[in-house]
Amino acid sequence: MAATKAFIAVLALSALTAVSAQTVSVYNGTYSATTPNNALFTGPITPDPCTIGPSYWCLSDANMRRCQVYNVTVGVCGYSSGKCNSSSVQDFCAQNPTALRFNGGLTNAPPGKFGYYALALYWAPTSCSANSTAGGGFCSSYTLAGTQGSQNLVLHGLWTDYGSLYTTEPAAPAYNGSYQGWNQYCSATGPGRIDYSRCHVNGGLCPWANATAANFTQSNYEQCMRANGVTQCQVEEATVSALQADMARYAPGFLGADRTFLDHEFFKHASCVGGYLTDNKTAFFETAIGITKQLTANGSWADVNVHQKRGTAVDTTAFVNSMNNTAIPQCDRNCQLSEVWYCYGRDAAGFPTELITCPIGTLGSNNCKSCPQILIPDYSAGTVRRIVSSRKLL
Ligand SMILES: *[C@@H]1O[C@H](CO)[C@@H](O)[C@H](O)[C@H]1NC(C)=O
Ligand SMILES: *[C@@H]1O[C@H](CO)[C@@H](O)[C@H](O)[C@H]1NC(C)=O
Ligand SMILES: *[C@@H]1O[C@H](CO)[C@@H](O)[C@H](O)[C@H]1NC(C)=O
Ligand SMILES: *[C@@H]1O[C@H](CO)[C@@H](O)[C@H](O)[C@H]1NC(C)=O
Ligand SMILES: *[C@@H]1O[C@H](CO)[C@@H](O)[C@H](O)[C@H]1NC(C)=O
Ligand SMILES: *[C@@H]1O[C@H](CO)[C@@H](O)[C@H](O)[C@H]1NC(C)=O
Ligand SMILES: *[C@@H]1O[C@H](CO)[C@@H](O)[C@H](O)[C@H]1NC(C)=O
Ligand SMILES: *[C@@H]1O[C@H](CO)[C@@H](O)[C@H](O)[C@H]1NC(C)=O
Ligand SMILES: *[C@@H]1O[C@H](CO)[C@@H](O)[C@H](O)[C@H]1NC(C)=O
Ligand SMILES: *[C@@H]1O[C@H](CO)[C@@H](O)[C@H](O)[C@H]1NC(C)=O
């Protein structure tokens, strides 16, 4: 019921002529006395240290208990490369100022404790070839030349992020931060809960004999699990079969030969939503696709500024300004548009709400800043210089 309501609300939002910011705050949380380890606290507390990120988590023993991270082992890495070091949160926090500069994913952090969503859409021609489905999980027969998937921004993922609206942070006033990292491969405690942290490269479910620990990436791990029939970290086909037509149009990478893209997005990110959208994989992907559909509809910001501008170079400042701080672009090293990351609010149950003004640190993660112009490549030869880059799944 709740999912249906959220989904309808998403679809009911009218197509925007530009990206419009809502005046909603980043979720600041309330706490139930029945939640484990919360006995010391009576909420609500603003700002909520559990949703803002690691620099707050490292304030004190009390905050760690409140955020349910005391004695939790975290994998200190965010990206998909390399096996990650793991340590206890206590040890991690003792590493200041390292912890204050942390800008990655906290593995095995609690689900549900996050500030806002990043909805990542990607631009397939930057990662895929006109006539090839090679190029990692982003490419499929639905991103080939002539497809809608090659001409519109399409879904990469709906990610839980820590974030603060504040320009200065009490724990680290000199540090402007980024978006304070994110939780990943989360595992709630309690009956019937699955340990999703084992889907992280440190999880030990599928150690390939031919790969050294130092050279065994998250991607190797996911492919190893697929190849060896380890299903614990796979999205069951039946849960997404009803979404295939929508995926072909709005999330074409999920239908590629490399099905680990779908697995990766769910177990790394959806595991951290907590509640209904983690328990119901169909609902999670349906929700993310629903937002993508709305954000890329005719007349939307993405339609006007990306789809209709494909094959051209756009002025970076004008492009960023048109987003009204509700999204940031990502570029590859050739100043080609690779992704657009929208900031989305969340409600208390974890459902995405609407576009928000991005937390201050997030805006600094626009990595197109040094590009005077952003190229929006298409597959027609000669329009812009296009070098297909190899990309990692985030
Ligand atoms: C975005 O910001 C510009 C400049 O402030 C404003 O003119 C425009 O109406 C805004 N667009 C939306 C959809 O809020
Ligand atoms: C936190 O939530 C309270 C109650 O909903 C609200 O009044 C307050 O403005 C919020 N603060 C922030 C920073 O979001
Ligand atoms: C953390 O682990 C240590 C060592 O096992 C134990 O003594 C301590 O009680 C634990 N603390 C909490 C809050 O669980
Ligand atoms: C992991 O630990 C080793 C040895 O302490 C260190 O050299 C390396 O930089 C660490 N890697 C990460 C990603 O923190
Ligand atoms: C793919 O297209 C490029 C030009 O766009 C061409 O050079 C190449 O031969 C094509 N490859 C195949 C396998 O058709
Ligand atoms: C943080 O941002 C402010 C304003 O842009 C700037 O003056 C300051 O130098 C920055 N601090 C750090 C540590 O980067
Ligand atoms: C390890 O072996 C598998 C199965 O033979 C192979 O598919 C895979 O590419 C190898 N991985 C690495 C990292 O060499
Ligand atoms: C890691 O694996 C890649 C590809 O399997 C290989 O080319 C490279 O030499 C390996 N590096 C190390 C340090 O083993
Ligand atoms: C899961 O979500 C799908 C899509 O919203 C819905 O049709 C289905 O009934 C849900 N399943 C459960 C068990 O709630
Ligand atoms: C969107 O615009 C395209 C091209 O103008 C048109 O073919 C398509 O039917 C429109 N879609 C909707 C849902 O209005």
Image (spheres, rainbow, N blue to C red):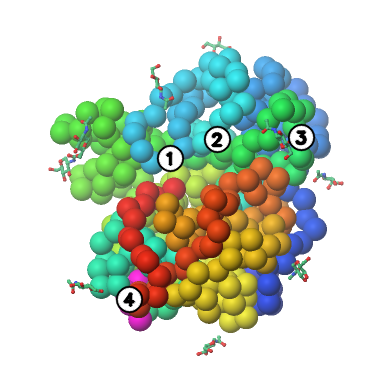
Determine the main secondary structure of the stretch shown in magenta. Answer: loop
Q: Which residues are magenta?
A: 142-146
Image location (x, y in percent) of residue 87: 47, 20
Q: Is label 3 or label 1 in front?
A: 3
Residue at the spot of label 2: 103
Residue sitting nearer the eye, 26 or 379: 379
User: Mark 1 or 4 closer to N-term?
Assistant: 1
Residue at the spot of label 4: 381
The reply to whether discs 3 and 1 touch (Cβ–Cβ < 8 Å) is no
Residue sitting nearer the eye, 307 or 311: 311
Structural crowding at the residue carrying mark 4, measured as other residues with C-alpha within 10 Å and reported as few (<14), some (14–19) or many (≥20): few
What secondary structure is found at the residue carrying circle 4? loop
Determine if the C-beta at disc 4 is less than 8 A from ligand 5: yes
* Residue 261, picture quadrant: bottom left
Residue at the spot of label 3: 168
The answer to whether any part of residue 236 appears in the image is no
Residue placed at 33% from the left, 60% from the top?
Answer: 388
Horizontal relation, residue 106 to residue 33: left or right? left
| Amino acid type of the residue that numbered disc 2 sits on in the rendered structure | Asn
Image location (x, y in percent) of residue 348: 71, 49
| Amino acid type of the residue that numbered disc 4 sits on in the rendered structure | Ala
Image location (x, y in percent) of residue 349: 67, 51
Q: Which mark is residue 79?
A: 1
Cα–Cα span, label 3 and label 2? 17 Å
Cα–Cα span, label 2 and label 4? 38 Å
Cα–Cα span, label 3 and label 1? 26 Å
* Residue 357, picture quadrant: bottom right
Compared with 291, 86 (above or below) is above
Residue 144 in magenta?
yes
